[in-house]
């Protein structure tokens, strides 16, 4: 056996493991972000269009993007999500995004009890809880 082959084997293993971890982290992050974006109620598409993905720090502004399907915001997320170990942010700074998440609308044809009929349980909290539950199950942990 050639000298140093153990080190080379360990390096290949470490590289493969890192690549697999990155792939899994990116996949889970994209699944979460996509669920939040698609779960955002649609009137004009402005709320879905204002989901912005960044690395390192959250975006603090808004955009004028109307994205009723969420495809542009999802595409941005897919292109931007960083590797494992870093922080990838999903931000939405519309003044009414908190009301969509936590309620507070007056009664009307599109609301019930202050919540949007399209997302009465919000879109962030419900999807974060769902992904956390799936990760616990995948990791063999029980609630």
Image (cartoon, grey):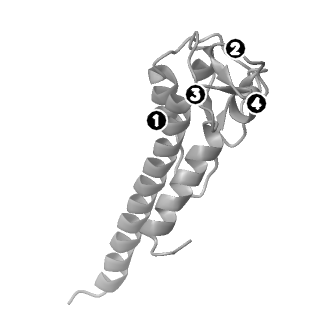
Q: Is residue 88 among the parts visible in the rendering?
A: no
What distance separates the C-alpha of mark 1 from that of mark 4?
24 Å
What mark, if any, has residue 108 been given in the picture?
Answer: 2
Helix or strand or loop: what does disc 4 sit on?
Answer: helix
Q: Which residue is mark 4?
A: 98
Q: Quadrant of residue 61?
A: top right
Q: Quadrant of residue 125?
A: top right
**Mark 2 or mark 4, earlier in chain:** 4
**Mark 1 or mark 4, earlier in chain:** 1
Q: Which residue is mark 3?
A: 40
What mark, if any, has residue 78 been given in the picture?
Answer: 1
**Mark 2 or mark 3, earlier in chain:** 3
What distance separates the C-alpha of mark 3 from that of mark 1?
18 Å
Q: Are marks 3 and 4 in contact (CB under 8 Å)?
A: no
Helix or strand or loop: what does disc 3 sit on?
Answer: loop
**Mark 1 or mark 2, earlier in chain:** 1
Counting other residues with Cα less than 10 Å from the Cα at mark 4, is it few (<14), some (14-19), or many (20 or more)?
few
What distance separates the C-alpha of mark 2 from that of mark 3?
18 Å
Relative to residue 8, is residue 15 depicted above or below? above
In this rendered view, identify the residue nearer to me: 12 or 89: 89
Q: Residue furthest left?
A: 1
Q: Position of residue 111 (x, y in %)?
A: 66, 21
Query: Which mark is nearer the camera, 2 or 3?
Result: 2
Q: Position of residue 126 (x, y in %)?
A: 59, 45
What distance separates the C-alpha of mark 1 from that of mark 2?
35 Å
**Mark 3 or mark 4, earlier in chain:** 3
Counting other residues with Cα less than 10 Å from the Cα at mark 1, is it few (<14), some (14-19), or many (20 or more)?
some
């Amino acid at each position: 056996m050639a000298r140093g082959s153990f080190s080379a084997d360990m390096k290949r293993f470490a590289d493969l493991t890192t690549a697999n971890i990155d792939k899994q982290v990116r996949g889970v992050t994209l699944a979460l972000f996509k669920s939040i974006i698609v779960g955002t109620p649609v009137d004009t598409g402005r709320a879905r269009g204002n989901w912005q993905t960044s690395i390192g720090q959250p975006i603090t502004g808004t955009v004028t993007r109307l994205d009723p399907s969420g495809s542009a915001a999802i595409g941005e997320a897919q292109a931007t999500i960083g590797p494992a170990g870093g922080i990838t942010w999903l931000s939405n700074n519309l003044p009414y995004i908190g009301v969509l998440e936590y309620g507070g609308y007056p009664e009307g044809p599109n609301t019930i009890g202050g919540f949007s009929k399209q997302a009465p349980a919000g879109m962030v909290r419900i999807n974060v809880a769902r992904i956390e539950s799936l990760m616990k199950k995948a990791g063999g942990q029980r609630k």
